[in-house]
Structure formats: structure tokens, C-alpha cells
Amino acid sequence: MQKIIILDFGSQTTQLIGRRVRELDTFCEILPYNKFPKDDPSVIGVILSGSPYSVHDPEAFKVDLSQFVGKIPVLGICYGAQFISHTLGGKVEKADSREYGRTHLETVNLDNPLFKGFEQHSQVWMSHGDTITAIPDGFECIASTKDVKYAAYWSPSPSGRAGEGLPIWAVQFHPEVFHTLQGTLLLKNFVVDICGSRQDWSAASFVDTTVSELKEQLGEDRVILGLSGGVDSSVAAVLLNRAVGHRLTCIFVDHGMLRKNEFTQVMNDYKVLGLNVIGVDASEKFFADLAGVTDPEQKRKIIGRDFIEVFNQEAQKIVNSKSSNSKCKWLAQGTIYPDRIESLNITGKVIKSHHNVGGLPKEMHLQLCEPLKWLFKDEVRRVGRQLGMPEHLISRHPFPGPGLAVRILGDITREKVRVLQDADDIFIRGLRDYVDTDGVTLYNKVWQAGAILLSTVRSVGVMGDERTYENPVALRAVTSSDAMTADWAHLPYDFLAKVSNEIINKVRGVNRVCYDISSKPPSTIEWE
């Protein structure tokens, strides 16, 4: 299978490059800057990402360009463009001021294959502190802005000898971000026209290939999968069910902090899908262990620990079962590509832990199966649709593993969970029911939404002729493409007014509703 390699130098937008390439129906891998795969004939091109470093920093990440320059087409982006120039004999210097934000290409060589179909004065997005002041011998400037002379450059023969080697391109702007209006076209020109992608990476091809690979990998063995009710684990379950059928057993643990009626609804969904699911109500254990705990990180750790204990107990029963001739040798997980990228940065240090990335309990002696490990979230949804799964499961918003526990400030009690479940249910149902002027529901317009119970805060209110002293609820809704960054959703005032009124009137314990209008960064999507 053809693939593009994206070498990660630490940019926050490296994942966006990968997603844009995948949107071109082309497989790609994001690898640390120093892990270029040698002697891999499936690699048809390489992209060098941006970086938080200057090329002059002692800690700056460096790569041996001779591994691929002249052998396959190369595209350097931002730091990648500066590193290429700096390494091959050009000059990179500190800019007079940070070049950040929207700007326009003043001149573009429209005859160059990288800019085929471009408009003059196309908008691009810059974000760098250094700038290229000279390009190496044998290279040519192909685009400039008002302030950046070498906004893009190339060499048809980077070896320096005419007619030898494949070309190299470099741009100081970011084609992967939304603000570069023709960025997708630039990447298409590189990936499809220059590198020669056949564009055969699709949901249909993924399903066919993966089911075949799973049959070969798993043979006649039994498989255990932990379900959360979310998109990733549900799609993984349906894929595995198509490959091994009844030999897949799924475990769905209810820690008591799911959304209102969610455990019953999700179990019914899985029954319709024909999955073999064991539902475990372990809420008593979770609430007992969380009693009096207020620290957010401690709450997460307790829930994570208890989940593993409960899951392992149920899984061990399956492993030890004598009811089948086949052995249980595999633990499947709904790990997706961003989980793996975020969990280990390019220095090998953990930067964000994920519940489904890591080691397995040694006593279980199980091998790991991750059928979605190469997919981004939007690709997982496309695969789910290809598998014929119900749309309400596919379009479901992300939901934190600890559930409503990280949406309740302070300690966790059943009564607080009840209050938040009721408020959250009104908010989410309202989003699903409200059809905006363009015919799309608010639920499908936002990336993630939920209610937060400010149980450590009490405010004065009036209900009828009586004074109340109860808790506020904050509503949170964000728009995002990948949760790396997020903007608060500009929900209609009439919708917010209706939801606020319904929550205050119907949810005992709440007398005030607020709307969170902070974006990520600096705020996170969840409150804890």
C-alpha cells in the first residue's frame, strides 16, 4: 500500500497534516523526525512538519536529509522549510518580528506543479519567529508575500546535478490549517500529482482489508473487548464481530457516572448490532471508593483503577471458561491513531495518558489487538457508516472515560450525579431537537457538549415565594475538528434561554444556569 511519511518535529499541527493527507484518500504515517523508514518501497513521498524550535537552537531536532532527498519527492513546511534551507547551504535568521497570522501571496509561480490551480494573492497562514533570508544554490523562489521573500521555494534537482534526483519543495506557511484557503489544493498537488498517490485509501477498502487481516491474525481464538458506548470501541466491536463472530465477547462496565439511562440504551444498541455483550453494574464499588474525594486527578485515578479491577475480573472468567474449545488469547481495544500520537511525543516522553494505550495486565497473558490504530476520529465514523451502524452511534459526541465524575466539582455522590444527569439530559436532548436555519441540528454542529455541576458553589435564587440556596450548572459546547484546539459554540440565544428555563424548572437542586464561553487553549474542554 502506498503511503506518505510525515516526519514530526514537534508542531502542534502535525496531526492536521496527517488528516489532510488522509482526506485525499491516501494513507500516511506520522513518525518522529528521526524514525524515517529506510528501504520501504511503499513510501511515495515525505513531508517535514513545523516545530517549536529554531533551527539555531542547540536542542533543535535534526534529520539526515540524505535518507530521502533526491530519492522521493519532499515537502518541507515551516520549520521543515527552514531546516532544509539551513542544512543545504541557505540562510535562516531571526525575523524582525514574529510572522504570525493571515497574509497573502503577492507573487506565485503558477507554472510550478505545487501551485497548479492556485489563485494570485491566495491567503496563507504564517507562524514562525525565524525567516529564510537566502535559499541554497540550485533552488528557486516560487512564492512571496509582502514581508516574506521566500514563502515557497523548490529545486527540480536537489543533488545539484541537472536531471538527477527527484525534486524538493518547501513552504514557510502552513497549508494544513483552515486559514490557508488553498492549502488542501497545495497538498493535493504534492500528494496526488507529484508523488503519484492512487488515492485508494477509503473506508470500504479499510473494512475489507482489516476484516481479512483480523481473520488471519486471530484465527480460531476468542477475543475480549472493553466497550465504553463511544464511537471508537463500538466500531472496533462491529469490525471484530464481522471477522470472528461469536468468538468476540464484549464487556461494558457501568461505573454509575454515565449519562441518564445510558447503560440501558447502549446495551439495547449493542443487542441490535448482534454483539455478545456482558453488562456489569459496578456503581456501588465506584461510589464507595470515590466517597469524600475532591481532587480531580485522584478521582480519575480511582475510576481508572476500579475500572481495570472490574474489567479484569470479568475478563478472567472468560479466559478461564471451559465452555468453548477455542482459547481466549486476545484483548481488543478501540485505540485510534491520535491516542497513540498524543501518548508519546517525539522525545519518547508521555505527554497525555490514554486509558486504552499502554501495557496489559501480565497475569492475563493476552495479546493486544487494535483494529482502529491507524484511523483518525473522522475516519472511524466513515468506517462505522460503511459497516451500516446506526447514525446515532456514529455521530455521538466524545465522552470522558471517567464520565460525569469530571463534570462535578468536589466530591461525588449519587445525588449529585442524579442532578447532573437530569440537567445534562435536558441540554443534550435540546441540542438534538433544535434544527438550525440551515436544516442541521445543533448536536451535529458541535464537537462535544455537556453540563457541569458546580457543587462547590451555591447561589441564592427565588422559586415562587420562597428563597432557594442551590447549585449552579454550567453548560459547555465546543466546535473542533480533533479536540487539540476548540472554540466555544455560538449557540442561539433562544435555545439557551429555553434550556436554562427547563433545567431550573425541572431539576431539583439547580437554581442558576451559566454558559461557558472559553476556548481551548487556554481552557480545556472538560472542567476537571
Image (cartoon, rainbow, N blue to C red):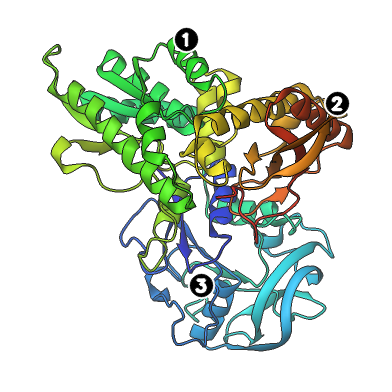
The residue indicated by pointer 2 is: 464
Residue wearing tag 1: 272
Q: Earlier in the sequence, mark 3 or mark 1?
A: 3
The answer to which quarter of the image holds residue 22 is top right
Residue 307 x, y percent position in the rendering: 34, 36
| Percent coordinates x, y for residue 123 in the rendering | 80, 62
From the image, tell me which residue sits under label 3. 163
User: Farthest residue toward the front?
Assistant: 466
| Residue at (84, 28) in percent of width and height | 498
Q: Is residue 356 visible?
A: no
Q: Amino acid at mark 2?
A: Gly
Q: Quadrant of residue 279?
A: top left
**Residue sitting at 71 percent across and 70 percent down?**
126
Compared with 460, 29 (above or below) is below
First-in-chain label (1 vs 2): 1
Q: Is residue 460 found left or right of 401 in the rendered image?
A: right
